[in-house]
Image (spheres, rainbow, N blue to C red):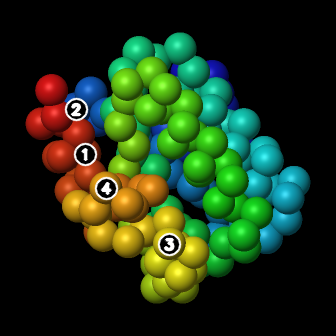
Amino acid sequence: MAGPFKHISAREERGVLVLAIELARISTYEQAEAMGRELIDAVEGRPEPKVVVDLSKLNYMSSVGYGPLITLRSRVRAVSGRLILCGLSGVVKEVFEATRLLINPQSPKSLFEFTETGDQAVGLLAEDK
């Protein structure tokens, strides 16, 4: 895992990589791209990574912020990993739902799995064999 990061923080918990977005707002392409590079760097080289992305500090994200998360999801799944989002605030969650990126955590049509808290997400992934 590369570091130190400017836009995210990273820690291991019960065999799960927890990546927290440390920005309150993602509104520019430059911010989104920099965050995306850090997310990819954090998971690079991990076989079958179990990853939680904590968005609890994020109050606003424009459409440019979704691309890096979708790219991360693709990278994680390409190596048989699993990704769960957590801590989506009201406005951020509403935009995810409006863009159909979140439909239902159990739905195969949903692009992202999500939980309310990081502890819930870590629990799901730590139990996942």
Q: Which residue matches tag 1?
A: 122
How many angstroms separate mark 1 from mark 2 (CA)? Answer: 7 Å
Q: Which residue matches tag 3?
A: 100
Q: Position of residue 120 (x, y in %)?
A: 21, 56
Secondary element at image label 3 = loop
| Dot 4 amino acid type | Pro
Asked if disc 3 and disc 2 are in contact, CB closer than 8 Å, the reply is no
Chain-order first, disc 3 or disc 2: 2
Q: Which residue matches tag 2?
A: 14
Secondary element at image label 2 = loop
How many angstroms separate mark 3 from mark 2 (CA)? Answer: 31 Å
Q: Using the rendered image of the protein, determine whether residue 117 is visible from the camera's viewpoint.
A: no
Secondary element at image label 4 = loop
Chain-order first, disc 1 or disc 2: 2
| Dot 3 amino acid type | Arg
Chain-order first, disc 4 or disc 3: 3
